[in-house]
Image: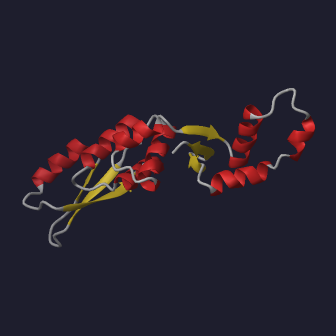
Amino acid sequence: MSIVLHATPYAFDAAGFYFTSHEDYEQKYDTHLPIEEYEIQFIDGPDEALNLFNAMKVSQANVGDFFEAWENLEDEPQTLALVCHLMTDHSYQDVSDAREKAKDVSVFEGTVKDYAYDFVESAYFTRETPSIFKTYFDYDGFARDLEANGDVETLSIRGTSYVVSGV
């Protein structure tokens, strides 16, 4: 699906224009001179592209970077969501820095309770552990504490829940 953006001029008597690529933007920008300043607005495209647009705070200065980042990330929905999350909630300013950090982040598909159960089972309980210990462990409380302490965060990517740790 293509992305449609609009360049809205700050001059009241000038017309704006729609564009679908950085090259398209540059061509139309040149034809609209002497108007130089535009607000860039997201008009149409996938939700993930809108998330990236907002995370990057797209303006005239970085509209080309936006299209490049989208081209590089659109086929990697999990990485794209992590990059947007890191830029929006963890103050990463640059897509490449956020993408580099995303490599170090652990992602688990499921709820925080599923994550807590899997973590405890794999880290602390073995086949030899009596089942009575497993029965009395408070997975709900542990999951709640993980989230409350900021050890994990939740993301939804295309309708699937993920737990992120290591941010």
**Residue 117 visible, this orientation:** yes
Question: Residue at the location (78% across, 48% down)?
Answer: 139
Q: Is residue 49 left or right of residue 117?
A: left
Above or below for 59 versus 98: below
Question: Where residue 31 sits: x, y (%)?
Answer: 11, 52
Figure colour scheme: secondary structure
Question: Where residue 38 sits: x, y (%)?
Answer: 20, 61
Residue positioned most to the bottom: 12
Question: Residue at the location (40% across, 43% down)?
Answer: 98
Of residue 11 and residue 59, the one placed in the foreground of this image is 59
Question: Where residue 49 sits: x, y (%)?
Answer: 41, 48
Of residue 43 and residue 117, the one placed in the foreground of this image is 117
**Residue 21 visible, this orientation:** no
Asked which quadrant contains residue 157, the reply is: top right
Above or below for 121 versus 83: above
Question: Residue at the location (11% across, 62% down)?
Answer: 35
Q: Is residue 111 left or right of residue 159?
A: right
Question: Where residue 9 sits: x, y (%)?
Answer: 19, 64
Residue positioned most to the top: 127
Asked which quadrant contains residue 24, the reply is: top left
